[in-house]
Image (spheres, helix red, strand yellow):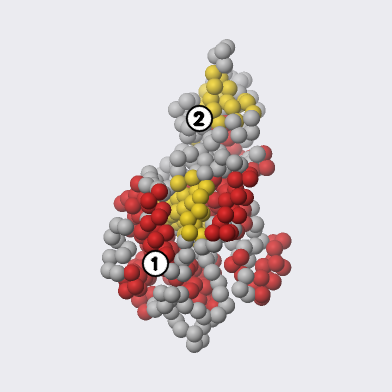
Amino acid sequence: MAAYLPESDSEDELPPGWEERATLQGEVYYASHTTTTTQWEHPRTGRRKEVGESLPFGWERQVLPDRKVVYVDLVNKKTTFTDPRLAFARETVTRGTSFRQKFDASSTALQVAHGRDLTGKVALVTGANSGVGLAVCRALALQGCRVVLACRSEARATAALATLRRERGSVEVEHLTLDLASLGEVRQAARRFLLHHTRLDFLVLNAATFPQHHSTTEDGLEVMMQVNFLSHLYLASLLRRALAAAPAARVAVLASESHRQAELRRPSSLTFNPGPVGFEPQLQYNDSKLCCLMLAPLLARRLAGLGVAALAVHPGNLLPTRLHRHSWLYWALAALARPWTKSCDQAAGSVVQALLAEDLPANTAYINNCFPTQPSATAASPGVQEELWEAAVATLELRMGEGCCTEPL
């Protein structure tokens, strides 16, 4: 477990003679052994902190016969007199407080999620059988979350489930067959999910493809535009009832810094199938990721009244995933760059932060390296975003029927 712990922030270290304590209500105060005084503000930073009322996942508070209180780590079979909540104290956020980065590009998903008790929560992750998606599933499942791995291949999903269960037999994980290359299959997958789950706390739109030749789906749409963006928009719309049923649900949409090289400027003229003439795979991928980035604020506006937040995330470049399997050139570049790029666990860190962080600035729409980041001017334009929504919904309604994105299943 110690390997999962991030390094401490030296600014938060207490001066000699001071001790940090917590009340049962989650308030943090500081006691000085030399002056026998107590105070609410951190003696070095001057900031106040608080902790959650519940203990981290796997911990239990016990009172011994001599009335001493101990804390038991049921997972690692350890006992301590120190309240484990203090390891995960967070600063009280007030108006005007600047964001203080606790994690960075090297932080793993497990480090970001460490100490959170996600028992009773439900997550659905697309493209979850390997790579970044599987790393996100692992981090959430090990903190008690019930995780649904939504992916096309049942064989790969079964192998992924076995991997997670080998690490900890008690994890709650399951597979949902989802083929994003078929809008009909997306609708059926959403129905199957809603039959078994009434709530959805975390929706991670992670799956993506990067073919090197023009191809279309059974719906007559270009593969990258449908798999990377359009089917994810449709899926999120179909699952809005479950998202609304969960308090403070979060949606994380995986975008890319390559959106800054996108050529798309007027989504109102977007056909979602540019045709094979002049088709350039990299440019099409960039456009699809620009659409993914704009999907986050679009969903945030439409689901805000239901208590749902949505953020876009850049996981990293040339990651060791199956995304480049269709191109020997990109596969070779990814292999050569491996010593300098993120691991899948590190790439998943920003995704988990988008799902769990409670101290992000209110206007955050995009996260890169666990830090709020400003997207391109095109991606940040509400007018361009709304044009994209109208074009996407019109395309979906043409194939799935009018009102397909708003009518309940």
Q: Amino acid at mark 2?
A: Val
- Which one is nearer the viewer's eye here, 197 or 124? 197
From the viewer's perspective, is residue 375 above or below residue 199? below
- Which secondary structure, mark 2? strand
Residue at 36% from the left image edge and 59% from the top image edge: 238
> Number of callouts in the render?
2
Residue shown at 52%/44% (left/top)? 172
Q: Quadrant of residue 320?
A: bottom right
Asked if residue 69 shows in the view, the reply is yes
Which quadrant is home to the C terminus? bottom left
Front disc: 1 or 2 = 1
Circle on res. 28? 2
Of 49 and 119, nearer the camera is 119
Q: Position of residue 236 (x, y in %)?
A: 39, 59
> For the point 58% across and 22% down, which residue is it?
70
Q: Which quarter of the figure has residue 165?
A: top right
> Which is nearer the eye, 310 or 191?
191
Asked which secondary structure carries label 1, the reply is helix
Instruction: Say above or below: 343 vs 58.
Output: below
Instruction: Please give left or right for residue 353 compared with residue 247 in the image.
Output: right
Residue sitting at x 51%, y 83%: 279
x and y, in percent, of residue 406 in the image: 29, 61
View extreme (top): residue = 66
What amino acid type should be assigned to the residue bearing mark 1? Gly
Q: Which mark is residue 86?
A: none
The reply to whether residue 108 is visible in this rendering is no
**Could you classify mark 1 by the number of other residues whose Cα lies within 10 Å: few (under 14), some (14-19), or many (20 or more)?**
some
Residue 221 place in picture, x, y as percent: 43, 76
Give the quadrant of the N terminus: top right
Q: Which residue is mark 1?
A: 184
Return the residue nearer the eye: 359 or 238: 238
* Residue 138: percent from left, percent from top: 57, 49
